[in-house]
Amino acid sequence: MDTEEQTLLSCPAGVPVKVLRVAGGAGFHLRLKNLGLVEGKTLTKVHSHPFGGPVTVRLQHTQLAIGHGMAKRIYVEISS
Amino acid sequence: MKRLILIGNPNVGKSAVFTRLTGVHATTSNYPGTTVSYTAGLTRIHGEEFEVVDTPGAYSLEYTNEAEKVAVDLVDSGDIVVNVIDATNLERNLLLTMQLLERGCPLLVCLNMWDDAQHKGIHIDVEALASYLRVPVVPTVGISGKGIHQLAEDISAFSERLDAHGQFPRRHEHTRSQKWADIGEIIDSVQNLEHRHHTFLEWLQDVSIHPGSGLVFAGIVLLSAFFGIRFLGESIIAYAMDPLFERGYRPLVSQISGWLDGWPLVHHILIGKLVNGNIDYLQSMGMLTTGLYVPFAMVLPYIMSFYLALSLMEDVGYLPRLGVLLDAVMHKIGLHGFSVIPILLGFGCNVPGILATRSLETRRQRFIACTLISIGIPCVSLQAMIMKLVGAYGLGFVAMVYLFLMMVVIVLGVFMRLIVRGFLPELILEIPPYRMPSVRVTLHKLYFRSRGFLSEAIPLILAGIAVINILDYFKIFDRIAALTAPVVTTIWGLPREAILPIVMGFLRKDIAAGLLVPLDLSLAQIMTATVLLSLTFPCIATFAVLFTELGWRDTLKSISVMLVTSVVFGGLARVLFGVITG
């Protein structure tokens, strides 16, 4: 398994990645958890929207949009 | 009477289940879909009456915004809690279910979107799920009504058991960290996935969220919405309302006008001024003439077509996509992408737009969004009048009015982003899959919104007209006009009498715009005046809701921003429109 650590913002689109950890306050953790995004989950980035726009990801059967700065604080590894 | 609370994640079809359960007997309706307050209705099952409450979508009992808080606060008031969950997204939905069980809620699970799950190749063992959760689980399709009968039966059985045993026993004890593990275990044993090929809807989903093609798609959607609304609105006016008022109502009201000949004041209030000896529905300004024509024949058709278009975009699941695409732009004006939804609602009526800002996370965002909506977003009542007054010269001029207001919103937004303290949280939202809208839910909403408009607007319009006519009869407005003349004539370039419509805008924007007609304005003046009607004092309903949502301190700040904006941008509008129209 490739263990190179990246953020959700920097990781390539279209490849399944595993969430390693989330940096940020309790409120941020809570909002992600409420949407089903917790450590250990596998998700796939769909697009990074330009000009500081959000990152869209596919998580199980849902699609989420996560703000630019938030995506920077979600660390992932490519699960190949 | 027992109280039934419907609770669930956003976009799981709670409103469709609610509509199915209550029929048309809902007592209140607070702009469902983007429900930020609750909706209550009644239903009768096997002779027992229940109060059914539809709550705003919540992902978790640990709420993160005001709208979710409303739902969480309501949970404990329910005798029975129906947790509506999306069968296509079992894992995420079960978090709330587990929390509800943990809280000891008397729970029933409604596994909605059952047909969608099957189309997507998601198979769920309902019995296994029910025995895991140890509560009744009913698969339903809210849109078609499938399974609702069973749900009603289960509710009734549940109610009987409650009556027999009294307090509902607390069933589950979980530690927090265990919750996801439990959910994982449940999912593994009850859900089976099978791979399916991409459908056309999924392709469309991808196209409309793509950073490039999504913007093109958004442009097409918004333009077709605009032209669709106009086409439908004008058609209702031309083929239904105008014939009704001309052929049906005119003989009657002319008769009344004749009878009132001997009472000039009464005639002035009820019928208004005659133009060339005839009643002119737009200019007469009587309670029985303009007072009925404006709400029924000019605004109502646009209310219906606007809300039809909005409901479609809402129910199909398009609005969150627009939020994602415009997120970067919205950051520039101190908001994030989700604010697109309150703003779009504001185009219908500022009141629900302002209420919808409850879904925004911070006070700063709410202040900025509320101020922008009440200043720069014309409600459909005003827009219908813009269409009539400015549209008579060509749609290009209507577009200029909109562009000007958009410029005001951007300039003000950038200004407030820099001035108002606080930080800007980021967008985080679920992009729901596209779904076929339910005709029943759409019509239900349309009915409530139209009825809401008529019951709120007509008393205000009639009272407003009565006041205007009395003031006019005794020439009281002349004095006010003399007082405000410097701003009105010198800065805005309007005749001094134009202060009357601008002041009346505080009551209703539509009737205020109607008051512009007898002033014999040039095109540039009409455009400036309609822009001013949007910029100046929000109508009384908007004002009241601003006050309750923001508190008096922020409302005063918002009003100060509004006053400065009206004077400055009113002057700018005069110059710009003067140049454009030659």
Image (cartoon, coloured by chain):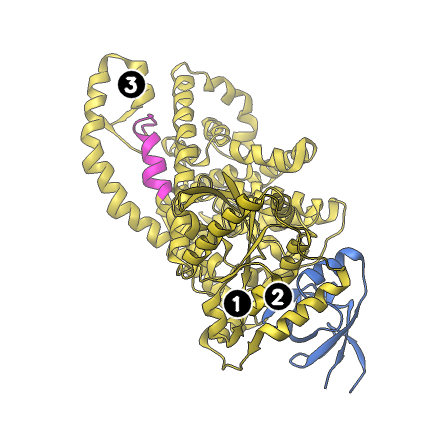
Chain colours: A blue, B yellow
**Which tag is nearer the camera, tag 3 or tag 1?**
1
Above-or-below relation of B371 to B7: above
Identify the subunit bearing mark 3: B
User: Is-magenta flag for residue B251?
Assistant: no
User: Is-magenta flag for residue B287?
Assistant: yes
B480 to the left or right of B145:
right
**Residue drawn at (22%, 42%) of the image:** B243
Of labels 3 and 1, earlier in sequence is 3
B259 to the left or right of B457:
left
Instruction: Point out residue B344 in the picture as x, y percentages from the top left corner.
Output: 52, 51
| Element type at mark 1 | loop
Between B169 and B78, the one lying in front of the other is B169
Q: Is residue B105 visible?
A: yes
Q: Which residue is mark 1?
A: B433
Q: How many marks?
A: 3
Q: Is residue B395 visible?
A: no
Of labels 2 and 3, earlier in sequence is 2
Q: Give me the disc on residue B267.
A: 3
**Which tag is nearer the camera, tag 2 or tag 3?**
2
**Residue drawn at (32%, 19%) of the image:** B268
Above-or-below relation of B120 to B350: below
Instruction: Point out residue A70 in the picture as x, y percentages from the top left corner.
Output: 74, 64
| Element type at mark 3 | helix
Q: Which residue is mark 2?
A: B132
Q: Amino acid at mark 1?
A: Pro
